[in-house]
């Protein structure tokens, strides 16, 4: 069982981005139902963002309303929030990190502790040691937040950060479409320092659910329309992996999404890996229940999937150029 800040959080977390960061967010009450369902399913590690939405509706404003209505749930959840941007640009200077954390705390309004804070990307103008030392001294040691995580970082950045403070988690994209962290040295560095991996987008931005069969299945206002892997030239090539996943899922009697998330779960401890907790996003109760269901993968299943991955190369970068440039991996 994965632990964060000494608390067991189950094998699957809950990504909050889709609840607020979309052209037309769903009604607040529908989001509350999804959040309740996540707790009931044991998905009590919640991951959101200061910039997930508008100033009027984002992860923090939604959380404040939820925990105002359900104060009994506040201590059940370990909450991690990404911030540290200045507009859409990473800015991990002490001044901006102070602004970001203080704003997160203000928006939570005392209804829920900010358990974990993480800068969303690495600011290459500010040494990571400067940022970590500041946050540790001013916020962790004073009890204003519980701990510090890293997001989209390299193994080298992890090694620099742990010399200054305790890192409680590292968030990175991990899925059947995004396996680079397993071979880049990042998993090895996190295992060395006993740092859990928080795996975002374990469903390949929805593609591994099997429900996106053509580009027409993607809403016109969806951000992924602009992602290289969903371009007209790359999409058909990437669909080949989805078809392989669907075949295995059918033989296992589960959905492709359940298989994809279970593969990420099974990375925990495998071949010396650190603990790994996937954080699929969902907006509906039924999808949360589906994502939380654990599918046992036998050794033969994992070997089959390893062979598929060995012969498959994702077509296109994870992000459009300007965003990819901010990734430290």
Image (tube, rainbow, N blue to C red):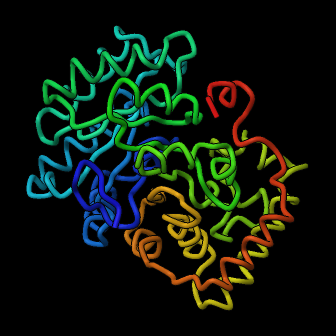
Q: Quadrant of residue 55?
A: top left
**What residue is at 55 percent from the left and 67 percent from the top?**
270
Q: In the picture, residue 238 is in which quadrant?
A: bottom right
Which residue shows up at 33% across the image and 28% down it?
165
- Residue at image coords 35%, 61%: 2
Could you tell me which quadrant the N terminus lies in? bottom left
Q: Is residue 272 above or below residue 105?
A: below
Q: Residue at horizontal 22%, vertical 30%?
A: 107
Can residue 58 be seen from the camera position used here? no
In percent of width and height, residue 203 lies at: 59, 61
In depth, the one of 327 and 27 nearer the eye is: 327
Residue 240 placed where, x, y %? 84, 67
Quarter location, residue 312:
bottom right
In the rendered structure, the answer to whether residue 323 lies left or right of residue 143 reads right
Q: Is residue 13 left or right of residue 35?
A: right
Q: State which quarter of the image contains the C terminus.
A: top right
* Left or right: where 248 falls relative to 130: right
Q: Position of residue 207 (x, y in %)?
A: 68, 61
């Amino acid at each position: 069982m994965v632990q964060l800040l000494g608390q067991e959080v189950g094998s699957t977390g809950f990504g909050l981005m889709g609840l607020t960061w979309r052209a037309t967010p769903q009604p607040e009450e529908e989001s509350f139902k999804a959040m309740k369902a996540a707790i009931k399913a044991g998905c009590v590690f919640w991951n959101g963002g200061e910039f997930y939405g508008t100033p009027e509706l984002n992860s923090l404003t939604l959380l404040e309303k939820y925990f105002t209505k359900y104060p009994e749930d506040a201590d059940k959840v370990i909450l991690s929030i990404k911030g540290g941007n200045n507009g859409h640009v990473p800015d991990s200077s002490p001044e901006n990190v102070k602004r970001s954390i203080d704003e997160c705390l203000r928006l939570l309004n005392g209804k829920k502790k900010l358990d974990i804070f993480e800068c969303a990307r690495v600011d290459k103008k500010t040494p990571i040691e400067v940022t970590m030392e500041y946050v540790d001294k001013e916020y962790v040691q004073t009890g204003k937040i519980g701990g510090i995580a890293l997001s989209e970082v390299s193994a080298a950045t992890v090694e620099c950060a742990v010399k200054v403070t305790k890192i409680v988690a590292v968030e990175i994209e991990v899925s059947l479409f995004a396996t680079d962290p397993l071979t880049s040295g990042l998993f090895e560095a996190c295992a060395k320092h006993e740092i859990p991996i928080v795996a975002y987008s374990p469903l390949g931005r929805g593609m591994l659910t099997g429900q996106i069969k053509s580009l027409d299945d993607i809403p016109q206002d969806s951000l992924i329309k602009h992602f290289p892997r969903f371009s007209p030239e790359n999409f058909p090539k990437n669909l080949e992996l989805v078809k392989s996943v669907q075949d295995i899922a059918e033989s296992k009697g589960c959905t492709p999404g359940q298989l994809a998330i279970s593969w990420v779960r099974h990375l925990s401890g495998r071949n010396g890996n650190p603990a790994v907790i996937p954080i699929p996003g969902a907006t509906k109760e039924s999808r949360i229940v589906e994502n939380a269901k654990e599918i046992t993968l036998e050794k033969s299943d994992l070997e089959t999937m390893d062979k598929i991955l060995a012969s498959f190369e994702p077509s296109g970068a994870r992000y459009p150029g300007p965003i990819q440039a901010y990734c430290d991996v």
